[in-house]
Image (cartoon, rainbow, N blue to C red):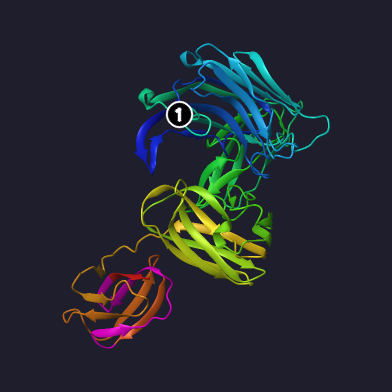
Amino acid sequence: MVIEARKEKYIGADYTSASIISRGIGDWKYGKIEISAKVPTGKGTWPALWMLPTNSEFGWPASGEIDIMEYIGTEPQKLHYTCHFGGINGTGHQSSGANSTYIADPFKKFIKFTLVWTPEKIEWYANDRKYHEYRKQPTYDYRMWPFNKEFYLIINLAYGGTWGGYAGVDDTKLPHKFMIDYVRVYQLQDTEGPFNLNIQPSPHGKVEVSPLLDVYPENTEVTLTAIPESGYSFKAWEYFSGANPYTFTIAKNTTIEPVFYNSKELLSNGEFNKNLNPWTFYVENNQNVSYTKSVSDSTFVIDITKTTGTDWHLGFHELGLSMKKASYKLTFEAWAEQAKQLLITVSKNYPDWSAWVTKTQMISTARKKYELTLNMPVNDDNVRLYFGIGRFLGKFYIDNISLTQIEPVTANKEISLSETAFTVYPNPTNNSFSVKISQCSYVDEQIIEILTLEGKIIYQTKLTNPESEIIPGQITPGIYIVRIKSENQIFTKKLIVN
């Protein structure tokens, strides 16, 4: 595998590169990881093999980070190994120490990097020689040892940045290639067999197990087949694999869960069945905001005890969404101890972080389902859906968040899209508008309807003459279809409501 850094324009950036992330299909707790890699050289390069916790319950760095190997081209003979955690020195950030190896010209050869991780210690090796070790303290303290849960693997090549670019960059050496020969992961076996296999239930599909046994002797080969229900697809065996069927050899007590998804749904955990993952929090200033968060009965609960009153100063978002230039339906259920205004944005997930779409919605004290139309003005494959809750004080609840693209109403054989059949003005409008039907198209007993892009009729009335003012009442801003029909003809036009 080759990760290549290039000088080229992309979404406001001057360079491109990539990361390979195993989260959700390659998550491990203890074991041995071997990676054979050849680093690039050149001022500004910053390749890394590292791990982050699957569920970052304390945020960074308190939830932990394991750096299997880091390298910066500015120091071409040094390879670095460490891990990070919250610590107890009062700064909120400690590490296992800055440990380096001097290997002559590592950019000219493949080196085998090995991490051995057990419940008691982490060890770092290069070409089978041990260079670093970090041990858990005799008295457990999560601030010093958050390495007792699943972590996932990241392989990336950064260019520049706070460390890689501290002495500048040398574009004349581009492109740079970070080369990976293989990645091997060996799990730590807890006990001898026989072992239990626990398949977690899913609301959107089932699992067939072969062979199906009460307990499994050590080294039994097992095949799991995920069968999604109608309207859903299989995504992965959470923390294990994306293969279906998935065949593996049992060497420990194993709990495994299939992940099914609606192919039209953009969000990965809007029902909060997976706790808060992958939703993350944003706070403008920790000194001015205090809150606690939890998931109770698959409902996201935020208890805000201190706030600035500015909506965007506190919020949560799902990052890295890909959205087209199209209309989207956002639905969610929410309520709060105090009725306040909620901010909703679709924003760039990269500098300058500005919003493509901004909406506000009053949230009442009673549980209610809300539906909004988000009109995305451009194609952007790296955006974030952000809920700004900085106005709220007390408990705020949200559940069943869904974001789907609205499919345009397509014409069937009855529908004529004739440009001369009728006109709509003004268009865009602020709710009321007029229609004028051409003489050749007008007949008695015509019906006018306003539909959402999903085909839901939200207004309907009879037309008594070829030119009429239509006052449908308050309509949520968005894109709609105006349809005029009689017994033997149907005409449609698009209507934009501001």
Relative to 461, does residue 479 appear above or below in the rendering? above
**Left or right of residue 306: residue 476:** left
Please say if 258 is above or below 253: below
Judged from this view, the residue extending furthest toward the top is: 104
Name of the residue lying farthest toward the bottom: 464
User: Does the magenta-highlighted stretch encompass residue 263?
Assistant: no
Q: Nearer the viewer, residue 319 or 96?
A: 96
Q: Which residue occupies the extreme right position in the image? A: 139
Of residues 334 and 224, the one nearer the viewer is: 334
Query: The C terminus appears in which quarter of the rendering?
Result: bottom left
In the rendered image, residue 320, in percent from the top left (x then y), is placed at 48, 46
- What residue did someone put label 1 on? 168
Label count reads 1
Query: Is-magenta flag for residue 482?
Result: yes
Residue 13: where, in percent of width, then height?
A: 40, 40
Q: Residues within 10 Å of mark 1 (few under 14, many from 20)?
A: some
Residue 420 position within the rendered picture, expressed as x and y whole percent measured from the top left: 18, 73
Query: From what the image shows, is residue 193 above or below residue 274?
Result: above
Front in this rendered view, residue 401 or 497: 497
**Segment tinted magenta in the rendering:** 464-492
Q: Is residue 94 left or right of residue 368?
A: right
Q: Looking at the picture, which amino acid does disc 1 mark?
A: Gly
Q: Secondary structure at mark 1?
A: loop
Q: Residue furthest front?
A: 167
Quarter of the image where the N terminus is located: top left
Which residue appears at 47% of the width and 31% of the height? 160
Name which quarter of the figure residue 97 lies in: top right
Q: Residue at x 20, y 75 (%)?
A: 421
Q: Is residue 162 left or right of residue 304?
A: left
